[in-house]
Image (cartoon, helix red, strand yellow):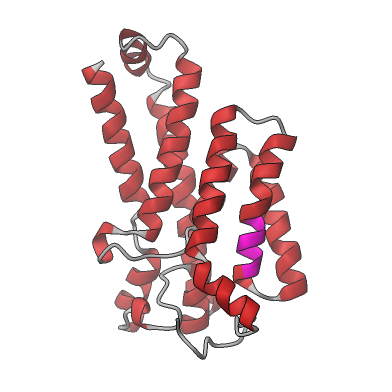
């Protein structure tokens, strides 16, 4: 049991560190000499990078943040493909290796999301975890991931408000998990991660109701 706990503890730490990789902060600091945390909304995610630095830096940040989520899930599946990990799981009194792996998948996903929004490297600040969540969903189930992305794109096309699109995707993901008959751990992840993403957008929600949330191409005039 101890060895199994240590193994999974290490996996969770690595997942957090993957999520905590502050791509938006590094690009702003290394290439533009600015602290993205002091610009716009203060987020290190792709949306604030877009408003502050432009579309190409934002695209790089978006891709890196998606890959962080994909790699976190791939890490669990890779480790659990080895006989030693399966042996430790059985020795810990857990005969259902597949279910153990699926529960670890959601825990790793949540750690990567928290890492993205609370990065150890930049004073436990970060982004809203939307891109990383998308990467995790695509790795969990490409059908759910693409469905969530479709909701995001449709809302963005009509509203031109990134935060509203992100919130809509966070709400839709739970329904998509249920409709596609995903495993129970994935459905629990969808609820937990969706709630967390919405909570991270609480100031955006206030601005949306106040009619002050900027659309694509607009600057954020008033900070909360």
Res 202 visible:
yes
Q: Which residues are magenta?
A: 164-169
**Considering only vertical position in the picture, is 114 above or below 13?**
below
Residue 164: quarter of image: bottom right
Residue 42 is left or right of residue 63, and the answer is: left
**Considering only vertical position in the picture, is 192 above or below 97?**
below
| Residue appearing at x 60%, y 81% in the figure | 213
Residue 21 is left or right of residue 202, and the answer is: left
- Measured as percent of width and height from the top left, residue 1 is found at 26, 15
- Measured as percent of width and height from the top left, residue 146 is found at 68, 48
**Considering only vertical position in the picture, is 180 above or below 100?**
below
Residue at the limit of the structure toward the bottom, as seen here: 221
Give the quadrant of the C terminus. Answer: bottom left
| Residue appearing at x 31%, y 29% in the figure | 8
Residue 202 is left or right of residue 2, and the answer is: right
Residue 9 falls inside the magenta stretch: no
Res 130 visible:
no
Please state the total of marks drawn on the protein image.
0
**Considering only vertical position in the picture, is 176 above or below 50?**
above
| Residue appearing at x 39%, y 52% in the figure | 114
Using the image as rendered, state which of residue 220 and residue 64 is in the foreground.
220
The secondary structure that dominates the magenta segment is helix
- Measured as percent of width and height from the top left, residue 63 is found at 51, 59
Using the image as rendered, state which of residue 48 and residue 59 is in the foreground.
48
| Residue appearing at x 33%, y 38% in the figure | 12
């Amino acid at each position: 049991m101890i060895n199994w706990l240590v193994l999974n503890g290490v996996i969770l730490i690595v997942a957090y560190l993957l999520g905590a990789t502050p791509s938006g902060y590094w690009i702003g600091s290394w290439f533009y000499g600015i602290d993205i945390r002091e610009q716009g909304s203060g987020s290190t995610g792709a949306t604030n990078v877009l408003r502050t630095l432009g579309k190409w830096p934002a695209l790089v940040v978006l891709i890196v943040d998606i890959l962080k989520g994909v790699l976190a899930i791939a890490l669990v599946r890779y480790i659990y493909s080895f006989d030693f990990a399966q042996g430790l799981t059985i020795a810990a009194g857990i005969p259902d290796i597949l279910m153990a792996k699926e529960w670890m998948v959601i825990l790793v996903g949540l750690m990567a999301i928290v890492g993205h929004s609370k990065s150890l490297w930049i004073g436990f600040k970060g982004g809203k975890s939307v891109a990383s969540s998308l990467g995790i969903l695509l790795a969990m189930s490409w059908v759910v991931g693409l469905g969530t992305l479709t909701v995001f794109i449709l809302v963005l096309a009509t509203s031109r408000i990134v935060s509203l699109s992100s919130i809509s995707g966070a709400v839709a993901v739970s329904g998509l998990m249920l409709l596609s008959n995903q495993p129970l751990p994935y459905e629990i992840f969808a609820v937990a991660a969706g709630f967390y993403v919405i909570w991270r957008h609480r100031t955006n929600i206030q601005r949306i109701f106040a009619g002050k949330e900027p659309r694509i191409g607009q600057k954020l005039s008033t900070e909360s």
